[in-house]
Image (spheres, rainbow, N blue to C red):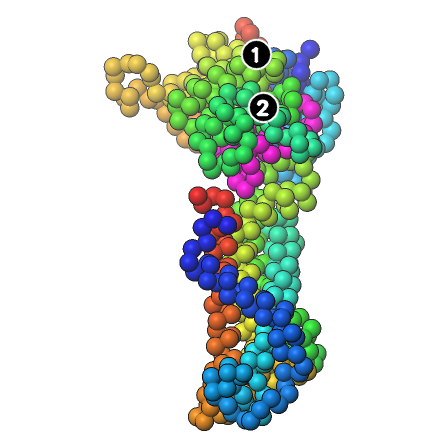
Amino acid sequence: MRRLGLGGWVGLSLVLAFVLIAIAAPWLYPGDPQDRVGRALIWPFEDPALPFGTDRLGRDLAAGIAHGTRVSLLVGFAAAAAAITIGVVVGSLAGYLGGLIDDALMRLTDTVQTIPGFVLALALVAVLGAGVGTVILAIAVSSWTGTARIVRAEVSSWRERDLVLACRAMGMGHGEILFRQILPNIAAPVIVLASVVVAVAILVESALSFLGFGDPSLISWGAMVAEGRGLLRRAWYVAAVPGAAIVVVVVAISLAGDALTRALDPRRG
Amino acid sequence: MSLLQIDQLSVRFGATMALDSLSLAIAAGETLALVGESGSGKSTAALAIAGLLSHQATVTGTIRFDGQALTDWRGVRQGGIAMVFQDAMSALNPVHRIGAQVVEALRLPRAEQRVAAARFLDQVGLPQPERLVDAYPHELSGGMRQRVGIAIAVAQNPRLLIADEPTTALDVTIQAQILALLRDLKARLGLSLLLVTHDLGVVAETADRVAVLYAGCLMELAPAAALFTSPHHPYTQGLLEARPPFGTQAPMLAELVEIPGQLPRLDPPPAGCRFAARCDRADQRCRAEQPVLRPIADTLVACHHA
């Protein structure tokens, strides 16, 4: 944790802040964030109790942002964890085993990759029905391919090193060589990718709920932007506040990912 | 009795005959050098002995180690044979600390690892071993890394150490140090050493006996001194003439005699002597009939004309 740099500290602090808001939302804004709290369209900072103002139906935007953080982060991290897991398993099996298994897995990866990710996610949600679980699944299924390709390339280049021979000469099994010797070496690119996948997953979730494919029972930033869309001329802040939240969290996650890569790599003094 | 006895060992990769009926023995405490150019089969032989051949390889023949036949071509040679690799950077794991890697094979409890690792690092002449156990490979120089590679091999308590081009990736001064270390360890631990190399200088400094391989075949097997003074096989003679002379006034380039041509294709190998196409003494018989090894003085030579 020595050399995070300014961007890294900013990114990590913001991500931590959003995580805290997500955890604390039920205490900060108890009750349903969809409840009316006052007059419609109070501008931000007009009323000190309602720092982000209210929307067309008089709902507190700050409460919506806080509760929406839960959905965005949950979907972002869960979908990214699932996508990275699938990608690492597929990529390392293909890269380590080679041959027919490699061909089969990579053609599968190619096939999934040729389908535009957002369209695939949209189609899955449309077929399976809206819901947090479905959204996570849809994003995971459409975003593991990049990880698989990078992990495969890295693993197959490590596979050729004398390290593998040296480990086998010591009596290590293939599982131990792959998981204890090779995979720790490719943690750096995977962490960068993970941060990108989290950021993209949050964007995709926002886009899905903007289009009305999110979980209807939960408040979400994308749905809030959609709400504000019709009011852009009269009250632009209704769309801009959740929009800004999306931008800030995505940028923060990217900065944190970059900084972690630098901090975790022992080869960079 | 020999520590390692190889009989009629052949290795094929598909149609390619990488190693053809190699028979060799290494005595306890002996250093045997396996010499040849790239593609001669010397590394294949080393990998076969170490049990590290890939699944594409088809192996026939027998290898006996300490009287025991090694039946599994891809099995671990625990407690007997260890290997030192050419490029220690590529054989070490960049994200694990040196100490943990040195004693990896011993499966020690964590508390004992540091002390044991420091002892092995000390044994291969590395300074401040207690500090080095916590270092990562990239913090070490090439020569130090190769010493770590040797420490890893020594930690496995081998009786035969296979060194595959152990000095090729190093500076000349470091090469000499590594060779001295190998000689020293051999004497101290009573090891046998199988040295795979293309560098005749390394051979002259280290080996007791030399096996010259060409295109998968053993061409000449001789005591090191005899090989340098009176090589019998035309290929060995060519190799020795192709060495840059040392300490002469004559310009280097004028002195070098190259062996014309290149290694034959081995899928399948040519009939007759493998070297016939590049040999100035080759005749009809050489191209038709593969020469068998026959003794001349204390040397074995596979040549119709030697």
Which disc is residue B120 wearing?
2
Mark 2 element type: helix
| Residue B105 within the magenta-colored segment of the rendering | yes
Question: Residue at position x 55%, y 93% from top?
Answer: A39
Vertically, is B90 above or below A61?
Answer: above
Residue B222, given in percent of the width and then of the height, sits at 53, 12
- Quadrant in the rendering for residue A87: bottom right
Which disc is residue A133 wearing?
none
Question: Residue at position x 67%, y 18% from top?
Answer: B5
User: What residue occupies the far front of the structure in this picture?
Assistant: A48
Is residue A234 visible in this depiction of the protein? yes
Question: Residue at position x 73%, y 17% from top?
Answer: B67
Q: Which residues lie in the magenta part?
A: B77-106
Q: Nearer the viewer, residue B296 or A88?
A: A88
Q: Give the Cα separation between the discs numbered 2 and 1.
A: 16 Å
User: What residue occupies the far top of the structure in this picture?
Assistant: B297
Name the residue carrying label 1.
B187
* Chain ID, mark 1: B
- Quadrant in the rendering for residue B119: top right
Q: If the image is split into quadrants, where does the C terminus of chain A sit?
A: top left
Residue B99, given in percent of the width and then of the height, sits at 58, 32
Amino acid carrying label 1: it is Ala
Nearer the camera: disc 2 or disc 1: 2
Vertically, is A12 above or below B120?
Answer: below
